[in-house]
Amino acid sequence: MNTIPSVTSLKVVPIAGYDSMLLSLSGAHGPLFTRNIIILTDDSGNEGIGEIHGGDDITKMLQSYEEIVVGRSISDYRNILKDVQKDGWKIRNGTEQCL
C-alpha cells in the first residue's frame, strides 16, 4: 500500500543580490534585492522549493511556520494553509509576535 509522504523539514534561506536602480512612481529603490527561499523536505526524500520577498520580519515569520507544517501529510495542504493563516501570529506578552 502506498503511503502519503509527510513534511520532515522546513528551511528558510534568506538571500540578497545586486539589482540595478529603477525609478518608479514612488521613487528609486536601492541597489539590492532580498528574497527568501523556502525548502520543504518530505519523508520520501523529495524536496520542494518556493520563493517570496525578503526582509528580517518575513524570514522570522516563515521560520515560525515550521511547527505548523512539519510532521503533517503533504495531502493536508489545504488545512496547513488554513492553520498558517489562523495561527501564524500570536499575542505574547501583550505584543503581536511570530509563533
Image: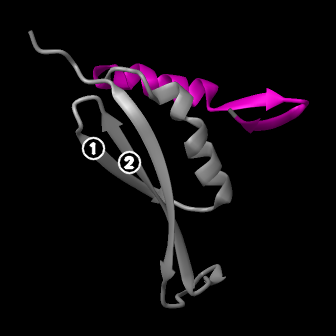
Residue lying at the far right in this picture: please name it: 94
> Which of the image's four quarters has the C terminus?
top right
> Which of the image's four quarters has the N terminus?
top left
Up-down: is 48 above or below 26?
A: above
Mark 2 is on which residue type? Ile
Mark pair 2, 1: CA separation: 7 Å
- Label of residue 47 in the image: 1
Which residue is disc 2 drawn over?
39
Q: Which of the 4 image quarters holds residue 23?
A: bottom right
Q: Position of residue 57 (x, y in %)?
A: 67, 53
Q: Nearer the viewer, residue 21 or 76?
A: 76
Magenta span of residues: 74-98
Position of 13 with respect to 98 (left or right) is left
Q: Residue at x 38, y 31 (%)?
A: 8
Choose the circle earlier in sequence order: 2 or 1. 2
Q: Residue at x 36, y 41 (%)?
A: 40
Position of 2 with respect to 52 (left or right) is left
